[in-house]
Image (tube, grey):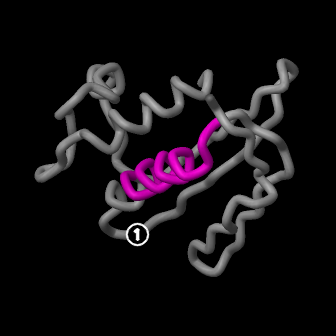
Amino acid sequence: MRKRFHFQRFPIFKFRRQFILIYTKIVLGERRKFEQCLFNILKNGIESMPGGGEIQIALNYEQSSNIRVTIKDEGKGMTQHQIDRLGEPYFSTKENGTGLGMMVSFSVIKGMGG
């Protein structure tokens, strides 16, 4: 059974001395698993910018009572073929990557209805 968690209890991320506060909204899902998804995606974004850069995180409420989380980085980008393979076991664009972090993230997000 999925549990409800409040975004207001979600930790505040500190990145380059900027604080990102997350809105108050009830979401169905397991908070720890969702935190791990965000960690995996943010870690990938940071690693895609070896020379530094900025990561933007946006939250939008949609009309269907869903929340859309958008994460953008300034990395080199991916081809359409690479994007299509995201979430596949053992697919990674990193030299020593396993692809398991994104696979788990996709699974958890899909389980939350995303």
Quarter occupied by the N terminus: top right
Q: Which of 53 and 39 is in front in this view?
A: 39
Q: Is residue 88 left or right of residue 21?
A: left
Q: Nearer the viewer, residue 76 or 20?
A: 20
Residue 64, by quadrant, is top right
Q: In this view, does 1 lie to the left or right of 104?
A: right
Residue 22, position as x, y percentages in the image: 76, 56
Residue 90, by quadrant, is top left
What residue did someone put label 1 on? Answer: 52
Furthest residue in direction front, as rendered = 1
Q: In this view, does 9 lie to the left or right of 94?
A: right
Secondary structure, mark 1, is loop
Q: Nearer the viewer, residue 102 or 107?
A: 107
* Magenta range: 29-44
Callout 1, which amino acid?
Gly
Q: In this view, does 62 lie to the left or right of 87?
A: right
25 w.r.t. 39: above or below: above
82 w.r.t. 57: above or below: above
Residue 91, position as x, y percentages in the image: 20, 32
> Which residue is drawn at the image coordinates 35% and 38% (left, top)?
102
